[in-house]
Amino acid sequence: MASLWMLFASFGFSAMGAAVKLASAYYTTSEIVMYRGLVGTLMLAFLVRHQGLSLRTAFAREHLWRSLVGVASLWLWFYAIAKLPLATAVTLNYMAPIWIAGFLFCAGWWHSKNHVEWPLIAAIAMSFVGVTLVLQPAVEAHQWVGGAVGLLSSVLSAMAYMQVRRLGHMGEPEYRVVFYFSLMTVSAGMVGTLVDGGASGKAAFSAHTWHSAGLLLAIGVSALFAQMAMTRAYRVGKVLVVANLQYTGIVFSSLWGMLLWGDSFDWHVWLGIAVILASGIAATFYNTQSTPRGAAVSKTDPIASEL
């Protein structure tokens, strides 16, 4: 079930990315970030009120850390996109699962555990090879600063995903995790929009049309459902399998490019897509076959439960 949640999340994030690309003709990046968070915050606030749920939490510090790291990662990624070829920036962002595997491997080594599941780590590495084939990244010598920022963005993304996992294990429901992240996104986007407006001397907020407002709504709704699905996947699934399935987002994004912008792909792109799909299937199959062994691991062992 966790695999299905992550596949849905990947599709939702790819749809959000397509809407962001279309909306960028009408709004600044800061405005898109702000409205993305605003739609999610309002929808979740309505849901909480309608169903009699609560936003009160005993883990304010953990939510603050997850939100700060997530927003910082988002902003650094946007900076990298401005400084690098898009293919390079996206590839760097998709290194997050590699860092997650590295974090868990180091944690297992530090605690002298012997249950590191190398097939899952190999599947993640294979997925990244597929992403590289699809995007064909290249960084020129004078772009090293943007490359370093993009790399840092992927590290922070990995930290944010791990914190999402931790909050789930602490018993926080998905809606609460996503709500506080959306609220932080609104705040960060608002500050960025006001700063952009002051620096340019123009109106801080762009005018709306029915079309552009619809794109903002699509961004917010798709981002919200994708965040909810991703949070559920990391909460109930095996983290390396879930992280590996994140790579399917590049497959969905490639299909959006074909549908909306008439993108055409060479053989290496199709090979990369095949590699991504094969690694996802292999990781899921391995996880299914190894479940009985994993079920025997003590629930008191946090490292074992992650791997």
Image (spheres, rainbow, N blue to C red):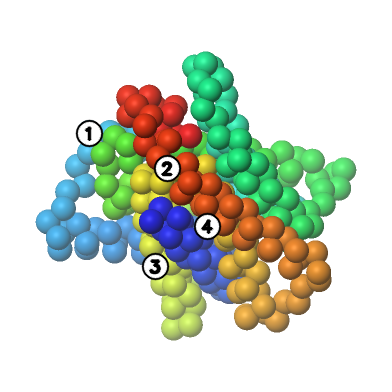
Q: Would you name the residue on which mark 1 appears?
A: 58
- The x and y percentages for residue 284 are 51, 52
Kind of residue at badge 3? Val
Mark in the foreground, 3 or 4: 3
Are dots 2 and 3 in contact, CB under 8 Å?
no
Q: Would you name the residue on which mark 4 appears?
A: 30
Instruction: Point out the tag, 2 or 3, that comes first from the N-terminus.
Output: 3
In the figure, residue 28 lies in which quadrant?
bottom right
Instruction: Point out the tag, 3 or 1, that comes first from the N-terminus.
Output: 1
Kind of residue at badge 2? Thr
Quarter of the image with the N terminus in it: bottom left
Instruction: Point out the tag, 1 or 4, that comes first from the N-terminus.
Output: 4
Q: Nearer the viewer, residue 108 or 214?
A: 108
Instruction: Point out the tag, 4 or 2, that comes first from the N-terminus.
Output: 4
Q: Is residue 250 left or right of residue 285?
A: right
Instruction: Point out the tag, 1 or 2, that comes first from the N-terminus.
Output: 1
Give the Cα separation between the discs numbered 2 and 3. Answer: 34 Å
Give the Cα separation between the discs numbered 1 and 2. Answer: 32 Å
Residue 66 seen anywhere in this rendered image of the structure: no
Give the Cα separation between the discs numbered 4 and 2. Answer: 44 Å
Q: Is residue 145 left or right of residue 73?
A: right
